[in-house]
Image (spheres, grey):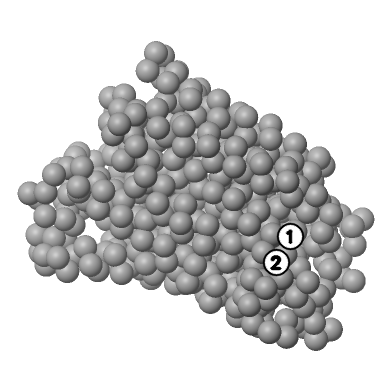
Amino acid sequence: MIQTTKRNLTGQDIKTLFLASLGGALEFYDFVIFVFFAAVIGQLFFPPDIPDWLRQLQSYGIFAAGYLARPLGGVVMAHFGDLFGRKRMFTLSVFLMAVPTLLIGLLPVYANIGYAAPIALLALRVLQGAAIGGEVPGAWVFVAEHVPPRRIGVACGLLTAGLTFGILLGSLAATAVNVTLTPEQIHDYGWRLPFLVGGVFGFLAVYLRSWLEETPIFLEIRQRKALSQELPLKAVIRYHGKAILVSALTTWTLTAAIVVLILMTPTLLQKLAGFSPAATLEANSLATLTLSIACVLVGMAADRFGAVPVLVLGGIGLVVCGYLMYVGLHNAPQMLLPFYGLTGLFVGTIAVVPFIMVRVFPPAVRFSGVSFAYNVAYAVFGGLTPLVVSLLTAKDPVAPAHYVAVTVVIGVVAVLVHGRWARHLPIGRVQAAE
């Protein structure tokens, strides 16, 4: 057995975690920057004579298309990752993200090419979704298989912090554009700048990935000829239905926390409470910073205490913060920064989700299992969440907080029922299907 439970993190482990996390941050920036400019993109890529609510719905629809494309990219990359190695797919995913991000920044708008503009935007967004579908589960599996079993939580926490730091980079880029440019300049060319920069970031991430090494566990699997004897996805579906279910339900909690409280809330607060774009983006940057820090702390806590208490306590805080944002701010708008900062801290509870997922699937099909469960759940829940929350918010301004509360309860129940898996399935057990 390559890994032992008593081994501490080595210098090589730390280097791997750093490079994987930094590359993930750059790739996730590319994926999320779209949402920060959804309003101006809706104005530029759709007919000017349609109602504002329909334009917003169509913009979020294209945003959702990226999530709906995730399962295809994730399953395909995971299939080859389980058969031929994690590193190759880990590097390919970031390259497939860089190209469409750069092209979005160069796209002609509706005024130039008519309906070809939103169609091209949709196609590039689908390519982005396919890339991120392989990136996120691949990254979690990659780092989890590089570190000792008792450090899986901190490894997944650091990687998740890197991914969320990509959101922070997107928020900072959007803030910089909104602060330094006038609305007319943003409309004319400013919205393109973050995409162009993101394309360059993406190619930098490709270079960073070239310094990584294949995971010891996959090398052991290949040496022992313990690769799955059937299609990895087929083995996952046949033998690991319960693992898929608990992974999918906790992923729903993760999507609600990220999509609603981090990605959608700045725009919703502008519309519902009259906050300025600059104020909400500044608060969002603080929330994303506290989120990144909390991911590491949550990973450390999961290593020490297990998934159940971490998710239960973190989930309670998440629900409370959701209502602070959508009820408390109406009575105390001056509390935007502290409320949003605290919310980001509890959104960090999401770092317990990969800690669970990498343990409930065995090594030979781990990449396929995590990718299938996570990406299908994110495609359904993450893709539909902006549409559902937008429609519900039109009737009830507190709907976003209600939605987060419901998903937290579902995630906690799933882990309470199956929580024993989160600590007791050996990360290094080599087996083909079960």
Of 300 and 400, nearer the camera is 400
Contact (Cβ within 8 Å) of mark 1 with mark 2: yes
**Residue identifier under label 2:** 240
| Circle 2 crowding by C-alpha within 10 Å: few under 14, some 14–19, many from 20 | some
Residue 392 in the image: state x and y as whole percent: 34, 37
Q: Which type of secondary structure does the marked residue at label 1 adopt? A: helix
Residue 247 in the image: state x and y as whole percent: 63, 55
Residue 165's label in the rendered image is none
Of 336 and 359, nearer the camera is 359
Is the residue 412 above or below the residue 72 in the image?
above
**Based on the displayed image, in which of its 4 quarters is residue 82 positioned?**
bottom right
Residue 298 in the image: state x and y as whole percent: 69, 40
Comparing labels 1 and 2, the label whose residue is closer to the camera: 2
Q: Position of 12 compared to 261: left or right?
A: right
Please, what is the three-letter code of the amino acid marked with disc 2? Answer: His
**Residue identifier under label 1:** 360
Which residue is pictured at 84% across the width and 68% down the height? 429
Whether residue 282 is visible? no
Residue 118 in the image: state x and y as whole percent: 21, 63
Q: Position of 78 compared to 421: left or right?
A: left
Which residue is pictured at 49% across the width and 43% down the height? 256
Where the C terminus falls, by quadrant? bottom right
**Based on the displayed image, in which of its 4 quarters is residue 199 positioned?**
bottom left
Of 340 and 384, nearer the camera is 384
Whether residue 104 is visible? yes
Residue at the top extreme? 331
Q: CA distance from mark 1 to mark 2?
A: 8 Å
